[in-house]
Image (spheres, rainbow, N blue to C red):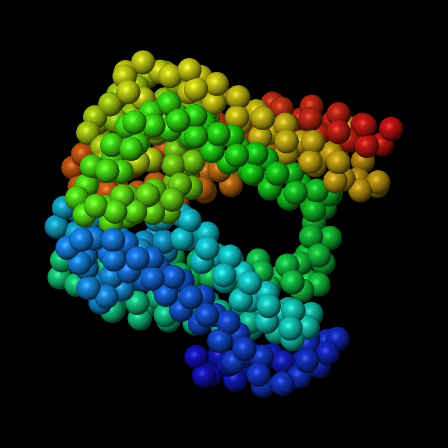
């Protein structure tokens, strides 16, 4: 770490940023703030839940250990429990970590006014190194005989998450991001905005489907919330866990909307073609599953979501294209790329959202990533092409 900080390029203002040895240590401080704040927040949440338990709940040390395990699961770790491996990332925590890492790197770049590749890359390298080191430390501290956590998966996840999120934040808050986009042929900025708009539209549609499904079985969700002991502790814990896994549930809905469907263990499969129900964990989110083997109406209606996402992506692309980026035909061609981007992002989202909740019947949870991504890209492209063409034609008229 010390050698990395000593080699961190620090140029003068206008060529690499303000000169000063504080840049590297500022990057260390901001990178350390992410795990410290995140782990403290999870620990306090665990303490609140345990305080609701009339029997006293877990002690503070055990609550801190569970918070650390949640943190590692968000990095892709697998916790080996007596019931089998727990390997599913609470994506809400993962998203919060990614946001924090992006702000950590971006704030250093903005404060030090770094505008050349060397210093910016140095800041990202420090953020990656610090986050990886803290993840390794947390892994060592939370591993027990009854809950073993391997070192490879969380470290690989920490490196990848810090590199992607930190790099995105650093380049966004420096002039290099705009320069990099300008080097791509065609309307690079407009395509990225189209992909972002289409993906957000798909996520919003999946959230609406999930809300309708949960609303149709409010009694079942309430029964799951109150079904555990511990009075308010059990209810608060289940609701909190459901919130952390909400993006995972939306990814499963995306698999349903695209066509391949999703599984919750070996006995439960839901798609627009058939429904097979088996035993599932008592989680309020799972009250959204159908009550019978019949395919619900909302599942059929959800098939419009990929096309709707493609339409939103195409319209956003057509409106954002510059004056010299071509006409309607060119926009239609770029619409194909935007739809492919929506499919790629959705496939990656589904990939990280799946996992395992134990062995045997719950060894697989989630939707197939490759099939979902390809299906979303194909269906989104059908609407993105005319959407981009019409939006571009109207923008130029």
Residue drawn at x 57%, y 58% as measured from the top left: 168
Q: Indicate the position of residue 374 as horizontal and vertical percent values.
A: 48, 31
Q: From the viewer's perspective, tell me whether residue 219 is left or right of residue 165.
A: left
Residue displayed at 76% across by 40% down? 321
Which quadrant of the view contains residue 170?
bottom right
The residue at the far right in this view is 397
Q: Work out whether residue 240 or residue 118 is closer to the camera in this orientation and state it.
A: 240
Image coordinates for residue 355, horizontal then vertical, percent? 30, 42
Residue in the foreground of this view, choosing between 19 and 185: 19
Kindly identify the residue that appears in the image at 42 percent across and 15 percent down: 297
Up-down: is 5 above or below 334? below
Q: In the rendered view, does 108 fall on the left or right side of 75?
A: right
Task: Name the image quarter holding residue 102.
Answer: bottom right
Decide if residue 83 is in sight here: yes
Q: Is residue 380 left or right of residue 14?
A: left
Percent position (x, y) of residue 277?
24, 23
Say whether residue 154 is left or right of residue 108: left
Location of residue 176 (image quadrant): bottom right
Q: Residue at x 40, y 53 (%)?
A: 93
Is residue 255 among what the camera can see? no
């Amino acid at each position: 770490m010390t050698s990395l900080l000593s080699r961190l390029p620090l140029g003068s203002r206008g060529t690499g940023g303000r000169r000063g040895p504080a840049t590297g240590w500022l990057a260390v401080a901001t990178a350390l703030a992410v795990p410290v704040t995140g782990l403290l927040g999870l620990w306090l949440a665990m303490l609140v839940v345990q305080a609701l338990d009339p029997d006293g709940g877990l002690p503070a040390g055990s609550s801190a250990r569970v918070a650390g395990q949640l943190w590692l699961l968000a990095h892709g770790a697998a916790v080996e429990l007596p019931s089998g491996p727990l390997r599913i990332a609470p994506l809400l925590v993962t998203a919060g970590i990614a946001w924090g890492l992006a702000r950590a790197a971006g704030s250093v770049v903005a404060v030090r006014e770094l505008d050349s590749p060397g210093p910016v890359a140095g800041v990202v390298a420090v953020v990656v190194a610090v986050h990886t080191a803290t993840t390794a430390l947390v892994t060592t501290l939370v591993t027990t005989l009854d809950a073993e956590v391997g070192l490879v998966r969380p470290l690989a996840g920490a490196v990848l998450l810090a590199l992607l999120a930190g790099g995105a934040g650093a380049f966004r808050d420096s002039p290099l991001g705009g320069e990099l986009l300008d080097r791509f042929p065609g309307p690079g900025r407009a395509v990225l905005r189209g992909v972002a708009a289409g993906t957000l539209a798909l996520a919003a549609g999946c959230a609406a489907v999930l809300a309708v499904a949960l609303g149709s079985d409010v009694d079942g969700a309430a029964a799951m919330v109150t079904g555990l002991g511990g009075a308010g502790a059990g209810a608060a814990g289940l609701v909190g866990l459901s919130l952390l896994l909400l993006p995972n549930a939306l990814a499963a809905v995306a698999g349903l909307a695209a066509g391949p469907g999703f599984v919750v263990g070996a006995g439960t499969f839901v798609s627009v073609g058939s429904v097979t129900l088996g035993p599932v964990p008592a989680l309020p989110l799972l009250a959204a599953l159908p009550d019978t083997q019949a395919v619900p109406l909302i599942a059929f209606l959800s098939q419009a979501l990929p096309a709707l996402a493609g339409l939103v992506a195409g319209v956003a692309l057509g409106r954002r294209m510059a004056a010299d980026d071509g006409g309607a035909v060119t926009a239609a061609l770029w619409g194909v790329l935007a739809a492919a981007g929506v499919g790629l992002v959705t496939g990656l989202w589904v990939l990280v959202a799946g996992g395992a909740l134990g062995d045997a019947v719950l060894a697989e949870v989630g939707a197939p990533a490759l099939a979902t991504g390809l299906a979303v890209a194909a269906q989104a492209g059908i609407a993105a092409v005319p959407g981009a063409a019409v939006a571009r034609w109207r923008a130029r008229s």
